[in-house]
Image: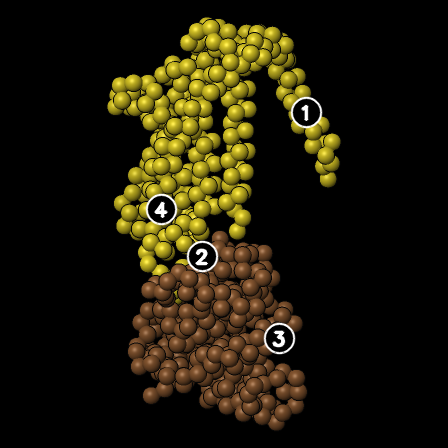
């Protein structure tokens, strides 16, 4: 059995205007240390998938097993980097990260917890800004804090929900490169949700395309044959890159939303 | 139209001048008992220029009277916050508590201080605690309601952060719920202080305790109408200053 197993996951939202079936049986699996991306159109239910795997909402059908254990509630072993950062604005960068470190290491002495906090702040190059409040930071820096917080609990699985979609193109590229570097150093197990095909190819080992909702499902996974460590430059010229891109784009075109 | 700095001073003064003119005309025509601005000043100057003189229990400088009122309001206000803030948090946090007590809150909120005061006198037998009871009971509702609304409008994003980290109830409260609610709470405090100050006059009038409101009522009964105007202006000035001060505190909390 794979490290993370998602089997025929279904979710329907019932509102005043009737029910909307968002996910219609999602299957997904990934191994420990793997970086998997899910690519799809906006509004296809990607965030719902993250919330389900994160345990923030309950599915209407199907199951999620992480390391053999069914997911029923949120927990720090499944870190989430939210699209809108979700930093606590009344805490400094340090305290935002420390909140996570302290929450998962209650037994450690304070000095050790402080060391871990500092380590993760340094990992995302924010040591000089450690005492700043989120509102004093640029969007890119805020998302770095969120990444540090997500990693600082040393989760079994890191879920990233369109983490860079609110950033300008240049900042986005910088953060993608940093994520590539961090992942290369730590080999966390990551699911990246994105609507950016190139981002997915740059970062992931395997990519699942998602059909637009309602009743969204994942298409067959596409392997990204690019060797690591990867460099953004010249990557688009590689045949492996073009093959992955073509496969994804073709799948997504074929199931384009009807409007 | 842009308002320049000199105009920021001149235009409000113009407004004051207009009120003085209307006041003079009213006192000269329809209401001969109403003292004109000049006479009001003449009869009140000692109270203003020597604000802390004391000739007797009910004949004191306006600063002294204001101080009595402020202390009374302060006590009632602190009591209102001490009771209102936890009730607000409970209303916001617990659905059961909300369903049990929200109807009571909505029922008690519109009751006038004039109705509470006699009840306070019945309960406490003395005018001072009755006045404070009335102030607290009338002033706490904005704090209760704003706190409850604040708790209920905490962004789900913040709560999700706490859920993912599996924070304990206490940590969830101290690290997420309370800081996220604080700006709402302080807006409630500002409104509560305004109400407390509004209630003081009624409370002092009915209990006859020394203070700006008590002085106002006494001077009405003694037919010294200019001192009514003096009291009204004092009440307005202090209310304005209190609101501004609380506004500053509120702005500090609102930083995020």
- Quarter assignment of residue A133: bottom right
Q: CA distance from mark 1 to mark 4?
A: 43 Å
10 Å crowding of disc 1: few (<14), some (14-19), many (20+): few
Who is closer to the viewer here, A59 or B21? A59
Identify the subunit bearing mark 2. B
Nearest to N terminus: mark 2 or mark 4: 4
Location of residue B254 in the rendering, given as x and y in whole percent from the top left corner: 52, 46
* The N terminus of chain B - image quarter: top right
Circle 4 is placed at which residue position?
B89
- Quarter assignment of residue A70: bottom left
Circle 1 is placed at which residue position?
B13
Which mark is in front, 1 or 3? Answer: 3
Question: Under tag 1, what secondary structure?
Answer: helix
Identify the subunit bearing mark 3. A
Circle 2 is placed at which residue position?
B155
Location of residue A157 in the rendering, given as x and y in whole percent from the top left corner: 41, 76
Q: Is residue B247 visible?
A: yes
* Chain letter, colour yellow: B
Question: Under tag 2, what secondary structure?
Answer: loop
10 Å crowding of disc 3: few (<14), some (14-19), many (20+): some
């Amino acid at each position: 059995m794979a490290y993370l197993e998602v089997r025929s996951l279904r979710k329907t939202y019932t509102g005043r205007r009737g029910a909307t079936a968002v996910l219609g049986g999602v299957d997904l699996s990934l191994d420990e240390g793997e970086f998997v991306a899910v690519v799809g159109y906006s509004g296809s239910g990607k965030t719902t998938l993250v919330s389900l795997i994160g345990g923030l909402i309950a599915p209407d059908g199907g199951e999620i097993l992480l390391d053999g254990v069914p997911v029923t509630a949120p927990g720090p072993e499944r870190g989430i980097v939210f699209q809108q950062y979700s930093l606590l604005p009344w805490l400094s960068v340090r305290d935002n990260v420390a909140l996570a470190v302290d929450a998962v290491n209650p037994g450690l002495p304070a000095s050790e917890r402080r060391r871990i906090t500092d380590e993760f702040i340094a990992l995302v190059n924010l040591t000089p800004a450690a005492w700043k409040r989120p509102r004093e930071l640029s969007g890119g820096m805020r998302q770095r804090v969120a990444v540090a917080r997500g990693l600082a609990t040393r989760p079994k699985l890191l879920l990233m929900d369109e983490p860079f979609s609110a950033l300008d193109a240049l900042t986005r590229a910088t953060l993608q490169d940093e994520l590539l570097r961090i992942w290369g150093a730590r080999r966390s197990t990551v699911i990246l949700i994105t609507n950016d095909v190139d981002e997915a190819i740059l970062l992931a080992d395997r990519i699942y395309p998602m059909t637009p909702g309602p009743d969204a499902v994942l298409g067959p996974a596409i392997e990204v044959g690019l060797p690591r460590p990867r460099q953004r430059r010249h990557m688009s010229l590689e045949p492996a890159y073009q093959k992955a891109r073509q496969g994804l784009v073709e799948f997504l075109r074929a199931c384009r939303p009807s409007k | 139209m842009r308002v320049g700095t000199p105009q920021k001073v001149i235009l409000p003064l113009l407004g004051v001048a207009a009120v003085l003119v209307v006041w003079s005309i009213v006192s000269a025509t329809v209401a001969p008992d109403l003292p004109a601005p000049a006479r009001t000043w003449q009869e009140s100057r000692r109270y203003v220029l020597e604000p802390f003189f004391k000739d007797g229990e009910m004949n004191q400088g306006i600063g002294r009277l204001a101080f009595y009122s402020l202390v009374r309001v302060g006590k009632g206000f602190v009591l209102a916050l001490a009771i209102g803030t936890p009730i607000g948090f409970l209303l916001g946090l617990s659905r059961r508590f909300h369903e049990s007590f929200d109807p009571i809150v909505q029922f008690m909120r519109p009751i006038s201080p004039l109705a509470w005061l006699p009840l306070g006198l019945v309960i406490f037998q003395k005018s001072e605690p009755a006045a404070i009871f009335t102030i607290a009971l009338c002033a706490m509702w904005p704090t209760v309601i704003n706190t409850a609304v604040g708790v209920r409008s905490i962004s789900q994003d913040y709560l999700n952060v706490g859920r993912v980290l599996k924070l304990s109830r206490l940590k969830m409260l101290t690290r997420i719920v309370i800081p996220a609610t604080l700006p709402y709470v302080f807006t409630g405090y500002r409104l509560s202080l305004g109400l407390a100050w509004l209630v003081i006059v009624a409370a002092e009038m009915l209990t006859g305790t020394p203070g700006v409101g008590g002085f106002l009522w006494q001077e009405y009964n003694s037919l010294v109408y200019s001192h009514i105007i003096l009291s009204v202006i004092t009440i307005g000035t202090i209310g304005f200053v209190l609101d501004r001060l609380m506004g500053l505190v509120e702005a500090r909390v609102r930083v995020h």
